[in-house]
Amino acid sequence: MSQARLHLGQTLSFAADPFDQGPAAVRHERRGALLVQEGRIADLGPADALRARHPGARITDHGDGLILPGFVDAHAHYPQTGIIASWGKRLIDWLNSYTFPEEMRFGDAGYAAEIAGQYLDLLLANGTTTVCSYCTIHPASVQALFEAAEARGMRIFAGKTCMDRNAPDGLRDTAQSAYDDSLALLRQWHGRGRASYVITPRFSPTSSPQQLQALGALWAEHPDCLMQTHLSEQLDEIAWVKELFPKARDYLDTYEAHGLLGENGLYGHAIHLEPRERDRLREVGAALIHCPTSNTFIGSGLFDMAGLIAEGQRVGLATDTGGGSSFSMLRTMAAAYEISQLRGHALHPAQLIWLATQGSARALKVDDRFGNLAKGLEADFTVLDLASTPAIAQRAARADDLFEALFPTIMMGDDRAISATYVAGQRLKG
Ligand code: GUN
Ligand code: ZN
């Protein structure tokens, strides 16, 4: 047994969902402690009580640092790391001009390994401990990400992006090869260590009905896998889907008709939804993944967070790197706040942090394993410096409570606010 380690600092955990209970859902210890043993949280509470209960534990004192669950990014494209912040295009043009040429390079296993490692280190620098990522059509791109995550001990969700039409030569698979390659990768990686395989049709415009059907069949054969795709991100895209699938009732129907709608489904963006789509998503208990920096950067629209949560949808939060313009979940929370403001609703800091941790873990159906600080959960956590820059420090110094102290870091913070990132109890940043 490895020796227990006691982490001292402020602690933030969730006793409930702040969208149900408001800020009272948050447990805050001004002088708290977290006991980590064998990669798990073995105890949690006030520092004095934990020191008394565990006198033999080694101590890491984070001072005034705020210990909170590691951030969970529920939708990203690691192969787009190198083209993040590419100027001037909207979705379809942006895919053709920047994304597809870059994704073409991931058939080269060496290049894929280089970017996968660089990407995961950027996540850790930003306090993100788990991501659910698209790869490219190349199995080598999937191997590279799973291997890089395994080397770091990170919990990872990923899958081969499938597309067999409306993509350039060299970046298309077929219905059969998408099924075969996905199955081989699923068999190799799903449930190995901290890895989970995610069935990944990119979106309806780049998959033939035959390919959607084949991946629907694969999902039916492996229903415990998650399935991720894009839904109703931009109006031009929706019009294109209508042309490509003239018989479909709406965009969601192009998935539903091929066995790709279910409670283990993750639907990225979900901005311009029809009433029928909202009803069906809620009925099946699917997860909607909000990607706010992407939605403003590519000019997609304003996600209806308040309305969707009020009607009982499951929502996660994500960067959507590199359509999203940041690797940071702090910046992502800030953008979610701003978009919600534009729709007339102020998200509370407790709700923002919840979305970036528990909410995304719940969308990925793993909130019983991580995404909170609680006994028995995996010890993936982040330590925030709430005074990481002079601009943030001067505002936080006026704060009367935790949320007022935390909100400037949510709105103005970046990787400088992350003093440490721990994965399964191991310090990987700081
Ligand atoms: N829709 C289909 N593919 C993508 C992608 O890579 N990024 C975004 N933002 N939307 C997509
Ligand atoms: Zn995406």
Image (tube, rainbow, N blue to C red):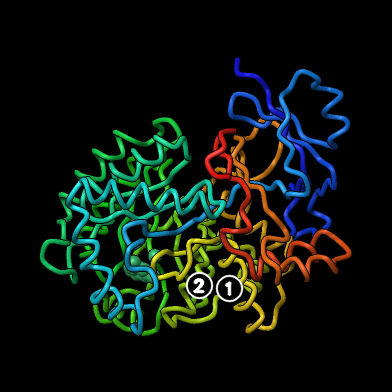
* Sequence-first tag of 2 and 1: 2
What amino acid is found at the position of numbered circle 2 in the picture?
Answer: Thr
Please, is residue 115 above or below residue 377 in the view?
below
Write down which quadrant ligand 2 falls in.
bottom left
Regarding residue 268, the answer to whether it shows in the image is yes
Left or right: where 319 falls relative to 199: right
- Residue at the far top in the pictured view: 1
What amino acid is found at the position of numbered circle 1 in the picture?
Answer: Ala
Residue drawn at x 29%, y 34% is 187
Q: Which mark is residue 112?
A: none
Q: Secondary structure at mark 2?
A: helix
Seen from the viewer's position, the closer of residues 190 and 6 is 6
Seen from the viewer's position, the closer of residues 39 and 288 is 39
Q: Residues within 10 Å of mark 2 (few under 14, many from 20)?
A: many
Please, is residue 273 above or below residue 56 in the view?
below
Location of the N terminus (image quadrant) = top right
Left or right: where 107 falls relative to 412: left
Q: Quadrant of residue 58?
A: top right
Left or right: where 400 falls relative to 387: right
Residue drawn at x 29%, y 44% is 144
Residue 375 pos. (x, y %) = 71, 32
Location of the C terminus (image quadrant) = top right
Q: Which mark is residue 335?
A: 1
- Residue at the far left in the pictured view: 169
Residue 43 pos. (x, y %) = 75, 30
Q: Which residue is mark 2?
A: 293
Residue 289 pos. (x, y %) = 50, 63
